[in-house]
Amino acid sequence: MNASAPSQDEDIPAEIDFSGGVRGKFHRPNVRLNLPVYLDADVQAYLSALAAKKGVAAQTVASYGLYPDYHQPSDDLAHINFKHLNAAIGSLIGPIEWLANSAFVPKWNEGGRP
């Protein structure tokens, strides 16, 4: 094991130039990041069923298949439909407020779907 610390640019390719970079430009102290996790459909179905059996609401919202670039290397900022995104997010406000302010507890329907 090498006890010496590597130089700061030892593993950065020569074509990458950070000389104009600003350290900490996007740092926000005490911010908790929640990264998205994409599960295979069968894993998601299993976890949703498990959550429902425990009385926990677990829901997925997606625009899968909205356009051919979805989750492809070509899926970039130029392909985002902001009008649709705004409407999709806005459509969740009412149901989330209702769920947060209700006594509703989901239940598993044996032999059914959550």
Image: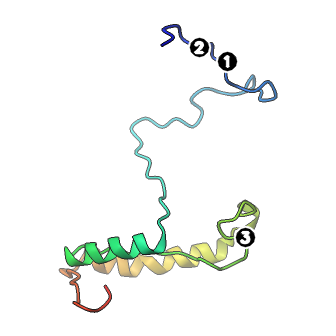
Q: Earlier in the sequence, mark 3 or mark 2?
A: 2
- Locate residue 103, reporting x and y percent: 17, 80
What residue sits right under mark 3 in the picture? 69
Q: Is residue 25 left or right of residue 16?
A: left
Mark in front: 3 vs 2? 2
> Which kind of residue does numbered mark 3 sit on?
Asp
Query: Which residue lies at the image location 21% right of the left edge and 82% below the top edge?
Result: 104
> Which kind of residue does numbered mark 1 sit on?
Glu
> Which kind of residue does numbered mark 2 sit on?
Pro
The image shows a total of numbered marks equal to 3
Q: Is residue 39 left or right of residue 83?
A: left
Query: Which residue lies at the image location 58% right of the left edge and 77% below the top edge?
Result: 63
Here the colouring is rainbow
Q: Is residue 78 left or right of residue 47?
A: right
Element carrying mark 3? loop
Kindly check if marks 1 and 2 are in contact, taking CB atoms under 8 A apart as contact.
Answer: yes
What residue sits right under mark 1 in the picture? 10
* Quadrant hosting residue 100: bottom left
- Locate residue 107, reporting x and y percent: 21, 84
Q: Is residue 66 above or below residue 10?
A: below
- Locate residue 70, reporting x and y percent: 67, 70
Query: Which residue lies at the image location 70% right of the left edge and 25% below the top edge?
Result: 12
Q: Nearer the viewer, residue 23 or 75?
A: 75
- Locate residue 97, reporting x and y percent: 33, 76
What residue sits right under mark 2 in the picture? 6
Q: Earlier in the sequence, mark 3 or mark 1?
A: 1
Kindly check if marks 3 and 1 are in contact, taking CB atoms under 8 A apart as contact.
Answer: no
